Image (cartoon, grey):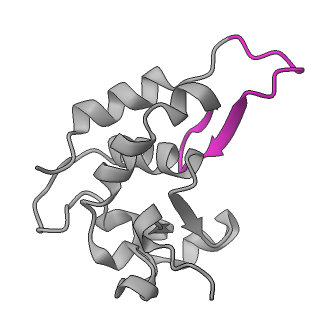
Amino acid sequence: MSIDPGRVEEIYRDSLAEDLAPEDVNYVVIEGIVHQTAFDKTKLQAHYDEVAEMLSWLSMQYRPPAVQGGGGWSFLNLCEDKDGHLWTGLHWTMEQLVQVGIGLGLAAWLGPRKLWQAFPGGMPYVSVTLPSDVVPAR
């Protein structure tokens, strides 16, 4: 198993918010590299387990040091799974996975957009924290 790029797109599209009204609070806007996207929180939450599973297939470099991860890695490396296999060749699909991950609280951009230009290729670093990565407080 690995990450299915077609399924990433399906989840992304299925979770989009429709007909946003100013009083609607059931959506979240996620800034991507190129696209700013509004997701319906309820629709997005329905895909939580599947998105977490997909993110678990990324390199440990994206995961927290508490689980022997690297704490974050370049967006440019997101196209490969943890076994080094290319799961997509499209930056747009990678951005979709990160955006749904951010919307679910499973991923984050590291550093503000204005600093992204300092990273290799001008691309941001991404971190992924899965429920199993969270160490209970003592």
- Given residues 128 and 122, the one toward you in this image is 128
Q: Is residue 54 left or right of residue 104?
A: left
Where residue 39 appears, as percent x and y from the top left, is 60, 30
Q: Is residue 16 left or right of residue 59?
A: right
The answer to if 31 sits in the magenta stretch is: yes
Where residue 71 appears, as percent x and y from the top left, is 45, 82
Residue at the (68%, 68%) spot, across then down: 112
Q: Please, what is the dominant secondary structure of the magenta stretch? A: loop
Q: Quadrant of residue 59?
A: bottom left
Residue at the (30%, 60%) spot, across then down: 56
Residue segment shown in magenta:
19-38
The answer to if 44 sits in the magenta stretch is: no
Residue at the (62%, 83%) spot, across then down: 137
Q: Is residue 82 above or below residue 5?
A: below
- Given residues 45 and 24, the one toward you in this image is 45
Residue 19 visible, this angle: yes
